[in-house]
């Protein structure tokens, strides 16, 4: 049997993009930081998935609101990522940056690398987490330099260089 701590040590070696997942409920914005976001399909219906621990305060809000927005963060949003990953800073999460509602009403971060507005279509329970599947109903792709914020080895970092692809 694999020990959970050993598994976590291995997974810390996988660099992942950092996203802020947002939703709206009763006019109140909610959000948290996630690295467990991925595309499921582009055709025939663009679909994303987000894995959310059921202990995260936003879990039940997403389930209730039936929508969420995935905001891909760039290097300059390091402090925003820290605020959205800290329960103590929950009250100030939406006060330091500009947000704009998209089709579902979920807040999209102005200046994010990309914002994907999703309608919740399915939920799969796996142990302590739920996998939320969302159909993308709106996308914002600003013209901004591609300098993604990443998370690796338990800390935020920046992807400063990109390998040039060469044809073989």
Image: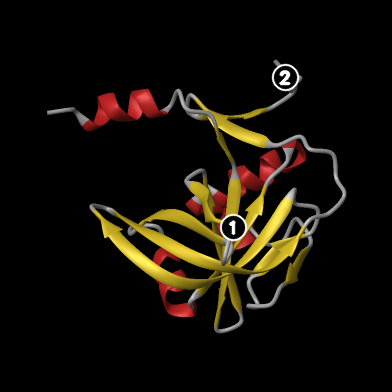
* Residue 151 occupies quadrant: top right
Q: Where is residue 20 in the image (x, y as percent from the top left)?
A: 60, 53
Which numbered disc covers residue 126?
none
Furthest-front residue in view? 168
* Disc 2, SS: loop
- Left-right relation of 56 to 141: left
One can see residue 57 in this view: no
Q: Which residue lies furthest to the right in this view?
A: 143
Cα distance between the residues tagged 2 and 1: 25 Å
Quadrant, the C terminus: top right
Q: Residues within 10 Å of mark 2 (few under 14, many from 20)?
A: few
Q: Residue at x 53, y 56 (%)?
A: 41
Q: Is residue 132 above or below residue 101?
A: above
- The vertical placement of 158 against 52, above or below, is above
Furthest residue to the bottom?
26
Residue beneath the point at 49% across and 78% down: 65
User: Would you name the residue on which mark 2 appears?
Assistant: 163
Under circle 1, the secondary element is loop
Residue, disc 1 = 42
Residue appearing at x 76%, y 57% in the figure: 97
């Amino acid at each position: 049997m694999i020990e959970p701590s050993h598994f976590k040590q291995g997974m810390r070696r996988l660099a992942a993009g950092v996203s802020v997942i947002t939703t709206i409920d009763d006019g109140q914005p909610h959000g948290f930081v996630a690295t467990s976001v991925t595309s499921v399909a582009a055709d025939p219906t663009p679909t994303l998935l987000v894995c959310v621990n059921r202990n995260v305060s936003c879990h039940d809000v997403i389930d209730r609101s039936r929508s969420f927005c995935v905001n891909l963060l760039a290097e300059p949003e390091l402090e925003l990522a820290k605020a959205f990953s800290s329960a103590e800073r929950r009250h100030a999460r939406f006060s330091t940056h500009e947000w704009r509602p998209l089709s579902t009403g979920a807040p999209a971060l102005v200046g994010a690398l990309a914002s994907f507005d999703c309608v919740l279509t399915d939920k799969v329970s796996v142990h302590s987490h739920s996998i939320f599947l969302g159909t993308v109903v709106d996308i914002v792709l600003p013209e901004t330099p591609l300098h993604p914020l990443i998370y690796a080895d338990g800390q935020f970092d920046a992807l400063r260089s990109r390998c040039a692809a060469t044809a073989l």
